[in-house]
Amino acid sequence: MKILIKNVRIFDPASGIDEEGDVFIKNGIVSKKKEETRNIIEGKGLYLFPAFIDIHTHIREPGGEDIENFESASKAAVAGGYSTIFMMPNTEPPIDNDGMVRFVVKRARDVGLVKIYPVGAATIGRRGERLTDMRAMIECGCIGFSDDGSPVKNPRILRRILEYLKGTGIKFIEHPEDTELSSDGSMNEGSLSNKLGVPGIPWVSEASVVIRDILIAEYLSSPIHFAHISTEASLDLIQFGRKRGVKITFEVTPHHLLLDEDNVKITDSNFKMNPPLRSKRDRKALIKALKKGFVNAIATDHAPHPLYKKELEFSLAPFGVIGLETAFSTLYTEFVRKGVIGLNELIEYMSVKPAGIFDLKTGMVRDGAPADFVLIDLKKKWKITEDKFHSLSRNSPFLGWDVYGRVVYTIVDGKVVYKEGD
Amino acid sequence: MERFKQKHLLGIEELSRDEIDSILDTAIIMKSVLERRIKKVPTLRGITVANLFFEPSTRTLNSFLIAERRLSADTINVSKSFSSVLKGETLLDTARNLEAMRVDMVVIRHSVPCSPHYLAERISASVINAGDGAHEHPTQALLDMLTLRERFGNIEGLKVSIIGDILHSRVARSLTIGLLKKGADVILCGPPTFLPEWFEDYGVKITYNLKDAIVDRDVIYVLRIQRERQDAAFLPSLREYIRYYSVNRDVLNRYARKDVIIMHPGPVNRGVELAPDVADGPWSLILHQVTNGIAVRMAILYLLSGIGSSGGVE
């Protein structure tokens, strides 16, 4: 299998390349020696980037096949320019044993569009009581462990998880939230939630678990990864932890970077997610951290829900928004085009850096590197509308946005897995 | 009178000062209907009003029912226990079904904040908020403002204190917004667990000290304390609450002006937030509030029905 991509703007921050040229791919890897092929992609006017890596995706299979299954999630991922996604374990039943890990690996391979790595539950049933068979799960292909959707409430259990993972090279991913403090909240707690009479989720419900986990990780000399950091306080605490030598990595989501509580439309649950859209001050702090290179990854927390569940009163609707198909374009439009961060930084946050956290290889324009690429028309303007989604769900807070940057091709292991318009 | 242009009554927040006045002016006309021997007018004949009460309520539901019947509207009632809600039907399904039955107006009481706003965006009938969670209770605030206007002639400059569980109170929110729009001076008072500092953002003074909310005030508005708040650790005990926040004769004698007025949205927990002799004493306007509730709700129904000048009440 050979592909020649011609006259494309090669943009590869990892190798420091930004030039127009050709890329030749043979048997899934980049090859310096060009060979004859009829398989030519005209890349004129397109950028070639290492394909994106989403370390936080919710696929609803098993249990919610009509909401997002392996086929639909894979299609959404490649349409968004992703070659690799991590699947969170909160399915029904959850991914909490090696049999379930095998199931995910097999389903992903059967669909064969995007690389899907299962994140296993750290505790059985995600109940925070007994550890899962983590060694067996790693052997079957688990990339990390998390009870995401829920925190590990009991600090003693968290300690055991971190301890048990020592030496495996596999990270624990915390969903940092004190659910007692969040209580029945459904938006950021503050003046606005108070005015609406809507129970709030205070920033301290996130930050208090962040500091607890940092201290436990320090005590055990274990690394820790935080999912969807949303508050200024958490950032300060992570900085504090790093100063003390704790190996902390964390991700932020596009929606927490691009929206804040003032954007919440209380009659539209597409603005309801957990953590909630925070204050302006928190959002500013996240952007500042992004600019400083303090952030380790941008991850979508793609959380599909069907219309019949989202089309409920705000407090009754489930938490979560989809993100795979809008992450690049929204961030490119709002941040890169407006000069908040550079294009190379955005690509690093969406590809190179998340790969680094979990020791994965990304696409690189280097002889012998895996051919995981996305080709994007940065000048192409499009409107985010429901009919554009490949996901089975439509719950996006970005509906109606006019954005720039359309994925034209996605190539995974040297195979074209997405072509715009197909 | 300027034509009322709103289609829904979702909250006091959405009303201008003039719109509040026009509702109160209309309510005064409606009140004269209530004082006739035959207390019914044909104004809303042929209009169907659905009362969707998903939270227990006797007072507000009955007040709406009487208002609707005085105006000759046809009414149906849907409550949680008798509707398909228990069979898993959503609020939107319920409302769309009513709409398919050609209901013109929907009065909704719901525990979820902003559910009337949610409905108003999705159905074509007029929506009247009869209380949405801790968010708003606009008809209550309007009837309270009518009561104040009758008593004092003018709301502007009035010194009003609202005392109790402010946090969970839709009455407190609606009334605060309404009073501020009409130029009153508002103090909110309660224990800190019931009074987060965000309330200062309304432009009111907050205090944890009952005395500060009693001294030199024209009106003391007392809120109902729900006994179950103790379980969620908002209150140590009712005994402790009563000791520091109950409005009783002793507190009034010591700190209040002689001509102070006591109001309460009902139903009163006698001996908890309000001493029995205060609730039933000469200061109290509580029963006036109840009567005005009907007049205000008639005015709202009339104004939102769009009947306007063509079919007046005279």
Image (spheres, coloured by chain):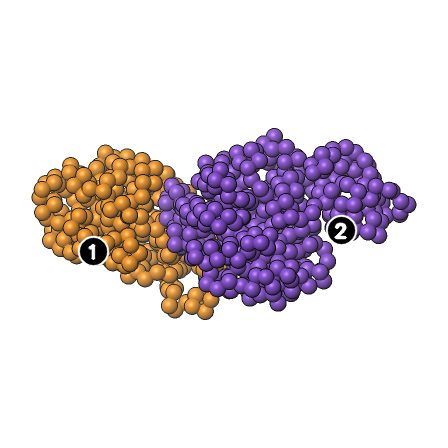
Chain colours: A purple, B orange
Tell me the residue at 74%/33% (across/down): A18
For the question of whether residue B212 can be seen, the reply is yes
Q: Which residue is mark 2?
A: A413
Q: Which residue is mark 1?
A: B238
Q: Chain of mark 1?
A: B
Please determine whether, in this image, residue B149 is positioned above or below residue A125.
Answer: above
Mark 1, secondary structure of its residue: helix
Please determine whether, in this image, residue B103 is positioned above or below residue A379.
Answer: below
Tell me the residue at 14%/53% (across/down): B275
Residue B55 lies in quadrant: bottom left
Q: Nearer the viewer, residue A386 or A48?
A: A48
For residue B65, side relative to residue B307 (left or right) = left
Q: Please report contact status of discs 2 and 1: CB closer than 8 Å, yes or no.
A: no
Question: What x and y, as percent, mark residue B261?
Answer: 16, 44
Image depth: mark 2 or mark 1 in front:
2
Q: Nearer the viewer, residue B312 or A127?
A: A127
- Find the residue positioned furthest to the top: A339
Question: What x and y, as percent, mark residue A192?
Answer: 40, 42
